Image (spheres, rainbow, N blue to C red):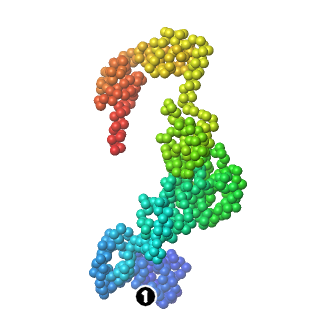
Amino acid sequence: MTDKSIKYTYPKIAEEWDYSKNASFDIVDFSKTSKKSVWWKCENGHSYKVSIHSRIRSNGCKICNSPLKKENIRKSKLSKGLSFAKAKPELLSEWNYIKNSLSPENVSEKSHLLFWFKCKQNHEWQSTPQRRSRGDGCPICSRANQGARIRKARLEKTGINLFKKHPELLSEWDFTKNKIDPNDISPNSNLNAFWKCKFGHTWEAQIYNRTGNNSGCPFCKSSTSKLEVFILCEMSKLFKNVKWRSKIEGYECDILLNNDGFGIEIDGAYWHDNKLERDLIKHKIFKDNNIYLIRVRDSLLPKIDGDVVLYDKKTQYIDLVIGVLKIISKINPKLKFDKYILDRIQIGENEFKKTLSLLPAPTEKESLLFINPGLAEEWNFSKNNPLTPDMFTANSEKKVYWKCKFGHVWEASIKNRHKRNSGCPICYRDNAGSNLRKSLLAKKGISFAQSHPDMLREWDYTMNTFSPNKISAGSSVKIYWKCVNGHTWLASVGSRTGKGYGCPSCSTSKRSLSAREVRIKKTGSLDLIFPEIAKEWDFSKNTKLPKDFPPGSKEKVWWLCPRGHSWECVIYKRTKKKQSCSFCLKENRKNKNH
């Protein structure tokens, strides 16, 4: 303890002593000359560390004093020279009046304070008036124009542009996607450009990669498999920034999920045989580049470490995609694909068909069109568009749509149709029923028409596609019947002849008539209790009147709303549940949504 303690000599400053942070010191032990660094806390709550000697000599909290100091410097510089507004009037249009609290008239042209600016391209950035006065502009525009300046310099140096040296590439330049003039680019440029081959494939590649490395269309490579295209199209729907045939340190990744750090390699037995050593090197390089490699590998190939999804000739493509997704979810639990795995539905079908249609097709003599032209005639061109039968071999596992001469459409694999000679399943079912009926009829020796002529009046000749002379009396085939009261129903011939069943509507009507009369006496009829609802009774379609039903009846009848819509509804749903015209309800919802 000292008599010259700042607690007594400078009591006002001592009030800012931070007792919580200076717990190991006692203020009474220090005089004004002490060089010990301690903590202080101003009246605004700012906590800062400075020596006792410096605190006595200073104006207090450096945080509180900083704005004041800046303001004094600003005023001093402004009084000694021109304001930014007077010195640089041409830059006033770029002054951001919304974000800046000061106007350019109150700031010196030599100020080192940061202010906001906005160029004519609406780019916003911070800079000092001093930097702007010496010529600094928008950094974003500068970076954007830098590439153009470099390309121009290179072109001036060589004196020859891309197409003068490589005219063969002119036909593959994608003039739609590329916004730059190819005449302004040198042959050795590292600029990425879009290309389009004669088959219509579009891809992105460096100009030098095309001129120096003679790279071509990645889609037209003979190593591109349908499996690879299938997985690519599915992944493109599930992930963002999916790259096809992207190179990493000279090694090509079949499918790269660029944003998520996963690579997918498709190892087919034909292409990857005797390449185990190369596969191992690629695995290590991808790992060093933080890319987790997943292999979709033919089971005939040698085993390899890492996560592998094996397949053989019978494996479905969708199962391989699901296998890859399960591995991705295991490595990164945040990525979930439960719905896709559960649905097992191809979501990239359109892209797959389009890409596949552009791949080099099999040779003419290997195609389905050449080997089995009769089968190719049933190819459904509208549903398979843009796929055509000359793009596949006759043994292809690809499932496509077919259309028979009767217009039936179905889906089946090309191989299944070619090898097994399978036809239209709808025609087969129709013919199978006809053949069965003929067999039973021949066995019984007598038709339904012959054994039960009294029932022929209820045979519905409009709805049934065959004659009662073509079916036996005990047949289990369900056909249409129509009673004298106009009721139509489905029932097997055997149930009518063997069990004596008749019209279910007439039967129900007879049983319920007496019960209905009792309820009407007890509760009243529909027209008396609910006259407004009874007004919507469709007298043209209903054989009975509103007075014939109680309000709680479960009978389904026809109604006609004020707008002229005719619809069916149970009576009690109208009276108890207040249901109204279903057509009007749909129209009101549609109008509300718009």
- Tell me which residue sits at (47%, 66%) in the image: 163
Q: Quick check: 288 left or right of 205?
A: right
Relative image position of residue 138 (x, y in whole percent)? 38, 73
On screen, residue 534 above or below 513: below
Residue at image x 36%, y 18%? 543
Q: Amino acid at mark 1?
A: Arg
Q: Position of residue 358 (x, y in %)?
A: 52, 51
For this rendering, which residue is in front, 256 or 34? Answer: 256
Q: Is residue 14 above or below residue 567?
A: below
Which residue sits at x=56%, y=49%?
361
Instruction: Give the percent coordinates (x, y) of residue 538.
Output: 33, 23
Picture quadrant of residue 139: bottom left
Which quarter of the image is occupied by the C terminus? top left
Residue 101, x across and y down, in percent = 32, 73
**Residue drawn at point x = 47 percent, y = 16 percent:** 459
Asked if residue 112 can be seen in this view, the reply is yes
Q: Exactly how many numbered labels are in the figure?
A: 1
Provide the residue designation for mark 1. Answer: 57
Foreground pick, 161 / 581: 161
Name the residue furthest right. Answer: 302
Query: Which sits in the foreground, 225 or 95?
Result: 225
User: 166 or 433, which is in the foreground?
Assistant: 166
